Image: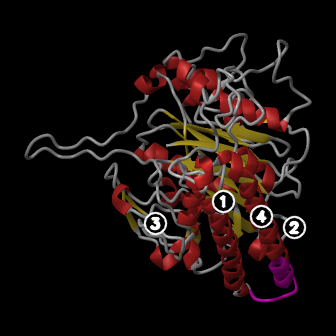
């Protein structure tokens, strides 16, 4: 599934929090936000896509998830924060190359072709990973280790990147072929941008096979590289992207331009992004995986980046100018996004509420980001009771309607959209500040259900008001409009 991931280390954020964020860009997948209590977690899991069956531990934690409303393709839980204040987002579909995939093939389902022949299950994939990992970990590093064990045992049928965060650390794991993997602790002072490619451009193998402080990988990774002649690096350098990733023409249209735009936003002064002396262009293969940002990054910056469509450049699909380049690159904020989340773990908040989950449904370009507390037994109906039928009674469909209408009347609606997005985040932050103070003052965490209800009530009011305004706006621009004075 094509997505965009942003990871923020604690020293790169404005408040010392860690953040992992991703747009879940399926094909208009209908999504909801739910809480899974330990009693609801199955003890034996079976994948719909690969048919693999996995026995699960007996001691799951409560966790949030953003599953698909239609279960025909499986759960696809996407993202969440568990009761130990560990966040996870899975997965960012990444690229590989034929040399890797030939040496360690993906583990795909092999159906029985004739009577009496046994089916051979495939490995795990995006459908499964959050459910198999998030309920059983108490730190970001533990998330890497549990997922690594699953990959080595069952394999995977696709190439993916997965992120974990706790109050101190952010870890990123990338799969390599069917069973291999590597993971890196994100340096505290950087922001990572990862747009559907194998991302890591540096990795310390000495640490991975020694102290394992900031790097982890498959036990046989060195031998795997050597035996299959995978290392394309020169002069003794080790760039995993060159070894395990891709360099295709399609990357230059679909992937690298997104990294270019995000890097341009994060480091407008410390790197040159445009002009004849630019260090990096939209189609550069060497755009860094991570940047020390020129200024600290807040939640609003992450949302902005995940909403972008090359504003201020010749590639903006909404520009009125005929630049000859309009819409030639894949935007980050795209029409078919199901859900976008920011898992924020805040070290300065009371321990019981350090995790804060920010949720946006539909196209991020037009829709609003809402904070909610994950430390509850149940999410409000506005987030969790979503059906496959269009309705203004839930945040998912209200967001989809706003996006579709505003896109049709972009030039006249965008101001209303910006006001809507600003209002939801501002009022959301105000409510979070209020309930944070109440918890810090000693009130019971049970008040968080009320907090989430208030947040959803506010979001519904703002969404309805915005729908009213932009529906009227686009209605006046309908092509069958006619006034007697028109002639």
Q: Tag 3, which secondary structure? A: loop
Q: Nearer the viewer, residue 422 or 111?
A: 422
Q: Quadrant of residue 458?
A: bottom right
Asked whether the residues under the numbered discs 4 and 1 touch, taking CB atoms below 8 Å apart as contact, a structural biologist would say: no
Residue at 43% x, 42% y is 156
Q: Percent position (x, y) of residue 268?
A: 87, 32
Q: CA distance from mark 4 to mark 1?
A: 21 Å
The residue tagged with tag 4: helix, strand or loop?
Answer: helix
Q: Which residues are magenta?
A: 434-444
The residue that mark 1 highlights is 87
Residue 204 locus on image (x, y percent) = 72, 31
Cα–Cα span, label 4 and label 3:
24 Å
Residue 413 in the magenta stretch? The answer is no
Residue annotated with mark 4: 425
Mark closer to the chain start, 4 or 1: 1
Q: Which residue is mark 2?
A: 348
């Amino acid at each position: 599934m094509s997505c965009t991931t942003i990871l923020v280390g604690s020293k790169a954020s404005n408040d010392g929090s860690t953040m992992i964020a991703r747009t879940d860009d399926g094909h208009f997948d209908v999504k909801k936000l739910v809480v899974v209590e330990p009693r609801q977690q199955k003890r034996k899991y079976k994948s719909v896509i690969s048919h693999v069956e996995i026995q699960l531990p007996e001691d799951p934690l409560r966790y949030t998830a953003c599953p698909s409303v239609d279960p025909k393709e499986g759960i696809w839980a996407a993202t969440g924060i568990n009761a130990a204040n560990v966040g996870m987002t899975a997965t960012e579909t990444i690229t590989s190359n034929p040399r890797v995939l030939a040496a360690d093939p993906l583990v795909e389902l092999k159906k029985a072709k004739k009577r009496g022949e046994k089916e051979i299950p495939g490995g795990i994939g995006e459908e499964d990973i959050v459910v198999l990992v998030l309920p059983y970990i108490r730190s970001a590093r533990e998330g890497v280790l549990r997922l690594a064990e699953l990959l080595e045992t069952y394999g995977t049928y696709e190439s993916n990147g997965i992120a974990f965060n706790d109050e101190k650390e952010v870890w990123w794991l990338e799969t390599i072929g069917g069973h291999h993997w590597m993971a890196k602790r994100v340096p505290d002072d950087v922001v990572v941008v990862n747009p559907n490619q194998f991302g890591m451009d540096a990795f310390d193998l000495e640490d991975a096979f020694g102290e394992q402080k900031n790097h982890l990988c498959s036990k046989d990774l060195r031998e795997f590289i050597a035996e299959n002649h995978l290392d394309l690096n020169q002069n003794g350098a080790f760039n995993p992207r060159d070894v395990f990733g891709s360099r295709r023409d399609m990357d230059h249209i679909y992937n690298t331009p997104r990294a270019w735009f995000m890097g341009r936003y994060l480091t407008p002064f410390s790197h040159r992004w445009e002009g004849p002396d630019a260090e990096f262009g939209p189609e550069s293969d060497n755009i860094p995986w991570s940047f020390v940002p020129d200024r600290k990054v807040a939640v609003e910056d992450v949302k902005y980046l995940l909403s972008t469509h090359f504003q201020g450049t010749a590639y903006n699909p909404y520009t009125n100018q005929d630049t000859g380049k309009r819409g030639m690159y894949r935007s980050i904020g795209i029409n078919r996004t199901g859900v976008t989340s920011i898992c924020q773990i805040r070290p300065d908040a009371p321990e019981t509420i350090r995790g804060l989950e920010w949720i946006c449904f539909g196209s991020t370009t037009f829709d609003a980001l809402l904070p909610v507390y994950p430390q509850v037994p149940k999410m409000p109906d506005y987030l969790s009771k979503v059906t496959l039928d269009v309705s203004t009674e839930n945040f998912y469909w209200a967001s989809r309607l706003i996006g579709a209408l505003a896109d049709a009347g972009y030039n006249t609606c965008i101001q209303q959209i910006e006001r809507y997005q600003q209002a939801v985040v501002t009022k959301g932050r105000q409510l979070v500040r209020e309930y944070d103070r109440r918890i810090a003052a000693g009130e019971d965490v049970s008040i968080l259900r009320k907090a989430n209800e208030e947040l959803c009530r506010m979001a519904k009011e703002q969404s309805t008001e915005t729908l009213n305004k932009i529906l009227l706006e686009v209605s006046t621009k309908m092509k069958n409009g006619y006034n007697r004075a028109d002639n």
